[in-house]
């Protein structure tokens, strides 16, 4: 599974509507950037992003707007964005618009880096699915416009499954059993990159875990709730039985070749990962099919899948002098039919599902017929059904970025069998509570 690498996958922030005091450590100033171009001529807004297709969208926006123009800067990836934005905020020259993922929203709001754009965009929220809209909200205020939804499903090698008499796993127990059979033939059923603990995150989410929650006027941290332990058990069994490849996404092309050559037989993904498969494969086109996420034993097939509310969003910085124009530009990029189609296509964009209410209509464009072959039509139904399985109550805490970095270090030891998943959870519980306290944030744990 690679929900974070090489590009951080979909994410969301759902935070209860109570006072900021004590919950978010407010810091940082509110310098102002001149995003305009002087007293005459159009307003020019800097826009930073990393997703394929954004340059074409910006070009279309500029061609259709006279009074507002976008100046696009392509950032390497999601993690680079955080570093560059940190430097820009400190220097007082943050861009007006920036792409980001929802797990960072609460952290950036706590630093005073994002603008409250509620008054400019609230009237358009009915155009978006509810889970995606929640991505840009903190304490009931809107700081960004969602650009993508990320329904999750399984993609698997039909030829390998047929060769060894296997069916698409419907439960995690089935998944493990299939992995044991494939292992006899030197095939791993999944890949756990040592730098990517999103596997644990999304399975915990699917099982109903809540690592962060708000309890009164404090944050509550719980890495050892029932859902997380259920997820940990599945992951530990996969690792103990050597059912996973251990390929780092640092060499993305090598990982894709492994899938293409049949070294690993499944991935739990969303639509945007398909674009990388299409771009890198040479042998296995038409051999892949989609199936719903496996569920935990005894749970219905429609149990909310391990997906966050959404993927990327476009945020407006507090330093932007033209916040209303920036908010309107963000809305245009997320709702204009041409722009949405550009981003939804694996060929012209990133293969992301739109965050719109009517995103069903974009499914056929967001998945690859070349990759799926005869399994393309059934695959559309799997994706459409998965749009209705998105969880809406996952909360990202104010120190999520630091927490996830720490978890990455610990996850590497899990994948290499130097510690158990439960050891990692014990460490993260203590570490996260202490980190919040050191930041002056009220916490229970």
Image: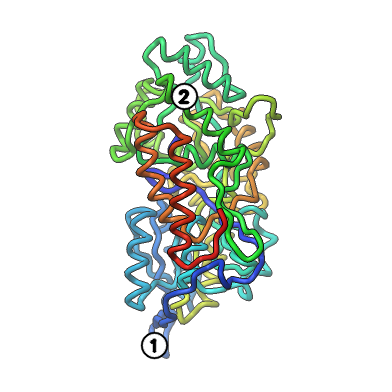
The residues bearing labels 1 and 2 have C-alpha atoms spaced at a distance of 60 Å
Badge number at residue 344: none
Disc on the earlier residue, 1 or 2: 1
Q: Which residue is mark 1?
A: 38
* Viewer-nearest residue: 81 or 36: 81
* Residue 337: image location, x then y, percent: 58, 56
User: In what element is the residue under mark 2?
Assistant: helix
* Residue 344: image location, x then y, percent: 51, 47
Q: Which residue is mark 2?
A: 238
Q: Residue at x 59, y 45 (%)?
A: 362
- The crowding category of the residue bearing disc 1, from other C-alpha atoms within 10 Å (few below 14, some 14 to 19, many at least 20), is few
Image quarter in which the N terminus is found: top left
* Residue 416: image location, x then y, percent: 34, 30
Residue 250 figure quarter = top left
Q: Nearer the viewer, mark 1 or mark 2?
A: 2
* Viewer-nearest residue: 374 or 410: 410
Colour mapping: rainbow
* Residue 378: image location, x then y, percent: 61, 27
Q: Residue at x 45, y 60 (%)?
A: 99
- The crowding category of the residue bearing disc 2, from other C-alpha atoms within 10 Å (few below 14, some 14 to 19, many at least 20), is many
Residue 38, can we see it?
Answer: yes
Residue 38 figure quarter = bottom left
* Viewer-nearest residue: 382 or 294: 294
Residue 256, can we see it?
Answer: no
Q: Residue at x 57, y 43 (%)?
A: 307
Horizontally, residue 413 falls left or right of residue 372, namely: left
């Amino acid at each position: 599974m690679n929900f974070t690498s090489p590009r951080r996958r979909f994410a969301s922030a759902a935070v209860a509507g109570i006072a900021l005091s004590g919950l978010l450590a407010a810091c940082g100033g509110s310098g102002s950037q001149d995003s305009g171009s002087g007293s005459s001529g159009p307003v020019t807004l800097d826009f930073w992003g990393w997703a394929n297709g954004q340059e074409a969208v910006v070009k279309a926006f500029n061609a259709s707007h006279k009074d507002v123009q976008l100046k696009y800067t392509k950032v390497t990836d999601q993690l680079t964005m955080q570093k560059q934005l940190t430097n820009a905020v400190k220097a007082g020259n943050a861009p007006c618009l920036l792409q980001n993922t929802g797990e960072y929203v609460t952290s950036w709001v706590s630093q005073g880096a994002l603008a409250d754009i509620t008054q400019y965009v609230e009237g358009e929220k009915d155009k978006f699915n509810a889970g995606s809209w929640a991505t840009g909200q903190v304490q009931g205020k809107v700081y960004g416009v969602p650009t993508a939804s990320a329904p999750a499903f399984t993609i698997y090698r039909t030829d390998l499954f047929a060769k060894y008499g296997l069916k698409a796993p419907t439960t995690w127990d089935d998944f493990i059993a299939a992995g044991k059979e494939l292992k006899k033939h030197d095939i791993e059923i999944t890949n756990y990159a040592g730098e990517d603990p999103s596997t644990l995150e999304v399975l915990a989410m699917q099982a109903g875990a809540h690592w962060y929650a708000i309890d009164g006027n404090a944050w509550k941290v719980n890495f050892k709730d029932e859902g997380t332990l259920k997820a940990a058990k599945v992951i530990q069994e996969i690792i103990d039985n050597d059912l996973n490849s251990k390929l780092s996404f640092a060499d993305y092309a090598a990982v894709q070749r492994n899938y293409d050559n049949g070294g690993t037989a499944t991935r739990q993904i969303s639509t945007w990962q398909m674009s990388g498969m299409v771009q890198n494969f040479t042998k296995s086109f038409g051999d892949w099919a989609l199936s719903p996420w496996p569920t935990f034993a005894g749970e219905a097939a429609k149990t909310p899948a391990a997906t966050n509310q959404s993927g990327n969003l476009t945020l407006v910085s507090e330093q932007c002098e033209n916040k209303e124009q920036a908010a309107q530009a963000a809305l245009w990029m997320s709702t204009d039919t041409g722009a949405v189609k550009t981003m939804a296509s694996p060929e012209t964009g990133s293969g992301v599902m739109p965050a719109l209410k009517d995103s069903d209509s974009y499914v056929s464009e967001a998945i690859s017929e070349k990759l799926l072959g005869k399994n393309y039509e059934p695959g559309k139904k799997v994706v459409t059904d998965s749009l209705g399985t998105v969880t809406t109550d996952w909360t990202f805490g104010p120190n999520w970025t630091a927490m996830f970095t720490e978890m990455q270090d610990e996850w590497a030891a899990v994948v290499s069998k130097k510690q158990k998943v439960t050891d990692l959870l014990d460490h993260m519980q203590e570490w996260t509570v202490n980190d919040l306290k050191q930041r002056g944030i009220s916490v229970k744990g």
